[in-house]
Image (cartoon, grey):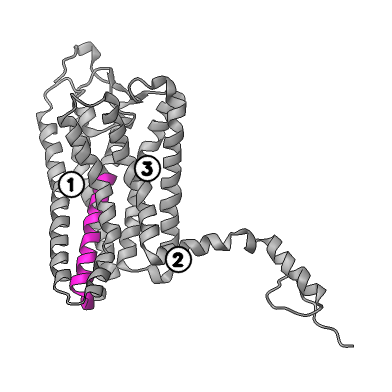
Amino acid sequence: MRTCNETNISPARFLLAGIPGLEADGPWISIPFCSMYLIVILGNSLILFVIKTQQNLHQPMYLFLSMLSVTNLGLCVSTLPTMLSVFLFNTREIGIDVCLTQLFFIHTFSIMESSVLVAMAFDRFVAIRHPLRYASTLTSARIGNIGLAIIIRGIGLHIPAVILLKRLPYSKIQSLSYSYCLYPDVMKMACTDTTPSSFYGLFVILSSLGLDSVLIVLSYIMILQTVLSITSRQERLKALNTCVSHICVILLFFTPPISLSMLHRFKKQALPQSQILLSYLQLLFPPVLNPIVYSIKTKEIRKRIMKIFQNYSPTDSNGGTDMVCLICLSRSQYVPRCPSASVTKSNP
């Protein structure tokens, strides 16, 4: 717990931090971060566009995938302004209200992403264990209720967290550890006892990420039991193949936090920059790679994305069409595929 004089208490302002020892290289460091943000926005927007425009993709698996893309975009938008302001413009000061708003959205979208992964695990469990009841179990109304529950859960867990932090006294200027605001980082800047806030933060972690990881593991244990009971080896592989994308996304989501906790345990032997970089990867790595994983491993999405790019390829541009039409006119015959050719073959 920090101590501060009465004259230094609130209204507090925080100083965001870049990467230790690399503050002068902020503009160069912003290039890979900007690239990652661009990939996140384009990739997840493309996934949402494909699912929205393809009627045959309005199925539970793809609706949950669209929820995952929305949470990835929300997480990206929550961290983008302050990270770019620190690395590009070296603007580090942030007010307490803005900071609390940012950490609310960061943690809310993180919990929502974890909840969506649980819903996707349930989707795979029903599809493999009860395939005949899949459509009747995961109806559109139920999927909508699941999505609403995910939103309420994420918001409901973090409104009290923000209220607890808002009531704490802070010094006028405090230096944070990252270029964005996180709950434990802001909490340790308080000038009073933070035991209630600390216990509530632990409760949120155990009731969200802790519970979700247990539910996902139990789902895949039951999925594995069902798959092993299938006699045909080909059918077993086919069933497991439908889970590959989801398993990859789970690993992308849980690996950085586990690595970060291990780094905290052995941080005496670790470089100071490694902890900061790993925390950035924890927020950016899953949103960057999730669309890539599903684009590669999901046949329907891959085919649709390829079709979109083929429609905008040079061979289908106006130049290509005009060339075909010139050939049509030179042969003096009507060809329906030429939009600019309306000449029919003349009678002698």
What is the secondary structure assignment of the residue under circle 2?
helix
- Residue 155 visible at all: no
242 over 76 or under it: above or below? below
Front residue of 341/94: it is 341
Quarter where residue 315 is shown: bottom right
42 over 301 or under it: above or below? above
**What amino acid type is highlighted by mark number 3?**
Cys
Q: What span is in magenta?
A: 109-134
Q: Identify the image quadrant of the C terminus.
A: bottom right
Residue 142: x and y in percent read 25, 67
**What amino acid type is highlighted by mark number 1?**
Leu
Q: Nearer the viewer, mark 2 or mark 3?
A: 2
**What amino acid type is highlighted by mark number 2?**
Lys
Tell me the residue at 43%/62% (across/down).
302
Q: Which residue is mark 3?
A: 76
Q: Which residue is mark 2?
A: 303
Magenta region, mostly helix, strand or loop?
A: helix
Q: Which residue is mark 1?
A: 209
Please state if 4 lies on the left or on the right of 347 as rendered: left
Q: Are marks 3 and 1 in contact (CB under 8 Å)?
A: no
Tell me the residue at 69%/66% (across/down).
321
